Amino acid sequence: MTTLTFDSLNPATGEVIGSHPKQGPEAVRDAVGRAEEAAAWWAGLGHAERRRRLLDYKAVIAQHLKELAELVHQETGKTVGDATLEIVLAITHIDWAARNAQKVLGRRRVSTGMIGLNLAATLEYLPLGVVAVIGPWNYPLFTPMGSIAYALAAGNAVVFKPSELTPGVGVRMAELFAESVPEHPVFQTVTGLGETGAALAGDPRVGKVAFTGSTATAKRVMAACAENLTPIVAECGGKDAFIVDADADVARAADACLWGAMSNAGQTCAGVERVYVVDAVYESFMRELSERVAKVRAGEDYGPITMPGQVDIIKRHIDDAAKSGKVVAGGPDAVRAPYVDPVIVEDVPEDSPAVREETFGPTITVRRTRDAQEALELANASAYGLGGTVFSRNVRRAMEMARMMRTGMTAINSVISFAGVPALPFGGVGDSGFGRIHGADGLREFARPKAISRQRFAMPGMNLTSFARGPAEVERLIRLVTFLHGRRKR
Ligand code: NDP
């Protein structure tokens, strides 16, 4: 007999934290039906009232910060400090989305150009209706909130399917929203395993799916969405590179690199996984890195591996890297499930799994490069393209390298700092997915542009969209276009 509920466990202790229903296709259909009605009401409230409600939700989250951090800590195993940080970031995103939705999406007049002189044109971004958010476990509050807050601010209702590893956080997020919006179920959470997500993505009434998780699952979700031509924004994994240029502050670079790679046990989609260091500073950087890594402890500075199956992938990468490269810290013995101690391996061939595949563990490979150009070429030779880092004291050069990095985001002289700037869009290219959450692009991702042109007066002698049009009008049009556009720029 199939069970109707599933447990969420503390990955550090195995202790049961909560039991949640496995919501099947029927329950999901009901939730989407309720969301459809709620969406019409929510859209009708208008920008000003939605802003007020979302800012209130932000305050409710802030008031429950400690409780939520404890729940995130229990379900993921991450430290309470890291859990707190992720909630604080989510709060800043709710705030930004609420305050900027009208400015970004609201109605505005646009220029009509000379040929449309007799028209008035307006553009606005209207809600899609119901947005389905399918979330991951690694940042169970911050990551889905990057879609949820922006979708809500754009006037949509949301049905959220959290990862089966972190259902409690998802349930609480929707419960707290109902304190600010008690009238209708504008934000609902459905719990369950992969099938629950599949039922949600396949519902034809869903206006858009916001998916965060692995590239493989994104492809399955896209296939389900294809049936109904449902658009999707896909935030998948990464294999982010960290470049240390010849004039970098190596002490700061080593400090940032270590945190970017090991915090949250490396379970960060935009975490540091590959490090490329220019020859001139290689020795000094490695000295700084080795000194620092000796003080970082699994189980103290960061928590366990949240998803038990991931330990095998991490172990396979470490074992392989240790055979072909030179171990600087950790090595095969670092894996003592559910914990993995920090691992640093030098000179791992670029075609090995530890360099090519997403590890999602507290491990890095480090490689010496001739110069920054070679570092950039190696960084870009990845199927993924989510984020990345450049350390350099030369701002112009760092900006140039950041722009040439084939990723959606790059941090300079800091790690992952782009995720904390709500105005910046977040998302990747290639196997890292497409579409953007956060910022103005993140708001527009959950809305449809609505274009309206209104004729203000009939243009004398220029009635072009009529069967009454004569050759003289066409002649006049040719003269006008030649005057406006017919001069070559040489
Ligand atoms: P998945 O891609 O398997 O799951 C992500 C979400 O999709 C979960 O809510 C999951 O539900 C749901 N899901 C699973 N199958 C389907 C389906 N057929 N249709 C719709 N939804 C579905 O990621 P995992 O959590 O298993 O993590 C595996 C890998 O994903 C990691 O190793 C890492 O590489 C990557 N990852 C990337 C993240 C990022 O932020 N970019 C975040 C987390 C993981 P359920 O949990 O119930 O299976």
Image: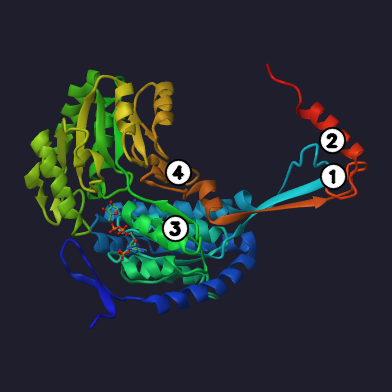
Tell me whether circle 4 and circle 3 mark residues in contact (CB < 8 Å): no
Q: Which residue is mark 1?
A: 464
Q: Which residue is mark 4?
A: 421
Question: Which amino acid type is marked by label 2?
Answer: Leu
Asked where in the image residue 331 lies, by quadrant, the reply is top left
The Cα atoms of the two marked residues, 1 and 4, are separated by 48 Å
Q: Nearer the viewer, residue 319 or 402?
A: 319
Question: Which amino acid type is marked by label 1?
Answer: Leu
Q: Secondary structure at mark 4?
A: loop
The residue sitting at the top extreme is: 490
Query: At x 39% / y 51%, what residue is drawn?
Result: 235
Q: Which residue is mark 3?
A: 210
Marked residue nearer the N-terminal end (1 or 4): 4
Q: Secondary structure at mark 2?
A: helix
Q: Nearer the viewer, mark 1 or mark 3?
A: 1
The residue sitting at the bottom extreme is: 1
Q: Is mark 4 within 8 Å of ligand 1?
A: no
Q: Which residue is mark 2?
A: 477
